[in-house]
């Protein structure tokens, strides 16, 4: 019996992959709303979805701004140094090119 299943899977690998992927995605899609709207036991009137999304979005925005303010003082001098070095190399190349030709 197992050999029949194995030979079928070997012959139809692509189709089996698509069927399995579709089944997994369908299952996740069906179960996601159930988990998302689950209420904790003993909660006396949990906030609605809009309030939860609003607080989550503001939390994410705060985290992103915190990360930017932590990283920016380090990145700006490095980027400035890279810009100065790049412009300096370009100027030196132009000057040496003009002096060697004239």
Image: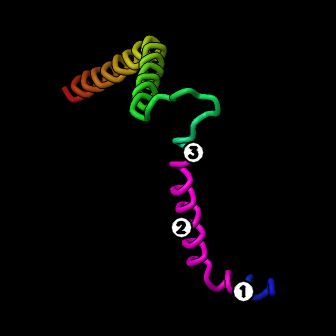
Q: Which numbered disc covers residue 22?
A: 2
- The stretch of residues the image draws in magenta is 6-34
Q: Please say if the residues under marks 1 and 2 sit with CB atoms less than 8 Å apart.
A: no
Residue shown at the point (40%, 27%) measured from the top left: 54
Q: Which mark is residue 35?
A: 3
Between residues 49 and 95, which one lies in front from this camera angle? 49
Nearer to us of marks 1 and 2 is: 2
Q: Which residue is mark 1?
A: 7
Q: Residue at the location (59% across, 28% down)?
A: 43
* Side (left or right) of 33 relative to 86: right
Q: Decide: is 54 above or below 32.
A: above
Q: Quadrant of the N terminus?
A: bottom right
Q: Is residue 16 above or below residue 77?
A: below
Gap between marks 1 and 2, in whole Å?
Answer: 22 Å
Main SS of residues in magenta: helix
| Residue in the image at 54% along x and 60% along y | 25
């Amino acid at each position: 019996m197992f050999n029949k299943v194995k030979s079928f899977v070997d012959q139809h690998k692509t189709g089996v992959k698509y069927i399995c992927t579709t089944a997994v995605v369908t299952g996740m899609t069906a179960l996601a709303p159930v988990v998302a709207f689950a209420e904790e036991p003993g909660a006396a009137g949990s906030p609605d979805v809009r309030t939860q999304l609003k607080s989550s979005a503001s939390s994410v925005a705060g985290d992103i701004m915190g990360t930017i303010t932590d990283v920016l003082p380090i990145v700006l001098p490095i980027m400035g140094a890279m810009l100065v070095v790049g412009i300096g190399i370009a100027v030196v190349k132009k000057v040496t090119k003009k002096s060697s030709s004239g």
